[in-house]
Amino acid sequence: MYEEKFMKLALELSARALAEPGTEPFGAVVVKDGQVVGEGFNHSVAHFDPTSHGEVEAIRDACRRLQRVDLAGCEMYSSCEPCAMCVAAMRVAGIRRLFFAATLDQSGAAFEGLPIAARHPIDVDELRRVAGATLDAGLTPAEQHLPREAIEILEAWAGSRKAAGHS
């Protein structure tokens, strides 16, 4: 269920970019059972990390605080509609409900005319197309090497988990 106080918190995080160099105005919070369990703010430029989007940072924070990687039952509040990478991260983490303020089109219009150096541009449509494509679709050149060695490690890890009684 939507609660405005959480959206306002995401917007407050977003507004930090007005004063912090190397940041961009995208903030997010993860909420579980009416409590904020994770906060995130875009630090891509400051951290030299293109994955440091507000939603991803909020997921990382929530996982650390809750000491788990499964965020099922949590909701995401974001100052902007998430990109495909952030949506994928939300799904991997188990977040199934999202509330957002600005759309990607609205944020793109707000940034229109900014020089590339002043922002970290993402071709949202390209990202959506590529993010869901298989490697054999040829969108990203890819080659497979040493599969047998990799499979041996995977099987050894899985075997050790089975032997330890993990399901």
Image: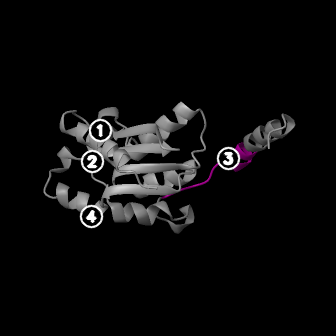
Q: Earlier in the sequence, mark 4 or mark 1?
A: 1
Q: CA distance from mark 3 to mark 2?
A: 35 Å
Local SS, label 2: loop
Instruction: Classify 10 Å Cα crowding around label 2: few (below 14), some (14-19), many (20 and above).
Output: few
Taking the spot 61% from the left edge, 53% from the top edge, the residue there is 144
Up the image or down, 79 lies above or below 22; here it is below
| Magenta range | 141-151
Q: In this view of the protein, which residue sits in the foreground, 107 or 79?
A: 79
Q: Residue lying at the far left in this picture: please name it.
A: 113
The residue labelled by disc 3 is 146
N-terminal-most mark, 2 or 1: 1
Front tag of 4 and 1? 4
Which amino acid type is marked by label 3?
Leu
Q: Position of residue 32 (x, y in %)?
A: 52, 44
Q: From the image, tell me which residue sits under label 1.
A: 45
Q: Mark on residue 105?
A: 4
Counting residues from the start of the chain, the first of labels 4 and 2 encountered is 4
**Residue 146 among those drawn in magenta:** yes
10 Å crowding of disc 1: few (<14), some (14-19), many (20+):
some
Q: Are marks 4 and 1 in contact (CB under 8 Å)?
A: no
